[in-house]
Amino acid sequence: MVDSDEGASGGESDDGRAGENPAYVDGVDGAGLVDASPNSLTLTPEQHERLKTRLHGDRLNEIQYSDRRYLVVGRGGDGGPGRRRRRVRDLLDDRRGATAFMLEDFGLSGDEIDLWAPAFEILCEQATHVVGVLGDFDGGHVWELGYLYHEQSRVRDALWLLKRAYESDERRRERYDNGMAAAHLAALERAAGDRVVHWRDGSDLRRAVGEIP
């Protein structure tokens, strides 16, 4: 059907800063994810415990023991963009020996925005593929794109972009009219190279997903 165009333990000192080898969840090497520099992600002990509570259990174990691990990023919500992103996750998750996941799958709510950045880093570290589903720049995924661009140079090597193409320049400008996000996307597209796959509508999205190994 064609969619419409709608829109782990320890590792902290008493002051809440991470130690030399922070372990946020079992099996995840957190070294280098958080330090005490002004531009880093420094967690308080309470935030650390909340993060461990979210990123644990069977779901994380499934990710760690899968051959291919797809972190799917993009616009959320219940509308068309959110449905298409979930469809991409489901298509990838159906593959043999693979699992696909989103931050929302771990119960992170809008009230826990302070945990999104460290959770995003941890899940990026677990992923063999980071798949961005793009149809516009109207949503929180603009932050994720900027974060990937500024902080996650390693992830760029695992990045695949499913970018929606529009028939007219006017429509394209309308959907991608965000200067800062456009600059981030241009840099990501250059880094991804031939790992940018274009799609035109919901029926074409399955074909685009099939190009991701």
Image (cartoon, rainbow, N blue to C red):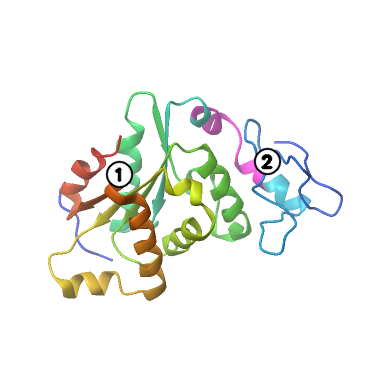
The answer to whether residue 194 is above or below residue 61 is below
- Taking the magenta stretch, the answer to whether it contains residue 90 is no
> Does 55 lie within the magenta span?
yes
List the residue tagged with mark 2.
24
Amino acid on which disc 2 is placed: Tyr
The dot on residue 87 is: 1
What is the distance, in whole Å, between disc 1 and disc 2 at their CAs? Answer: 29 Å
What's the magenta region?
A: 51-62
Q: Is residue 33 above or below residue 62?
A: below
Disc tally is: 2
The C terminus, quarter of image: top left
Q: Position of residue 103 (x, y in %)?
A: 49, 48
Position of 29 with respect to 19 (left or right) is left
Residue 40 x %, y %? 67, 58
Q: Position of residue 122 (x, y in %)?
A: 57, 44
Residue type (three-letter) at the residue carrying disc 1: Arg
Q: Quadrant of residue 112?
A: bottom right
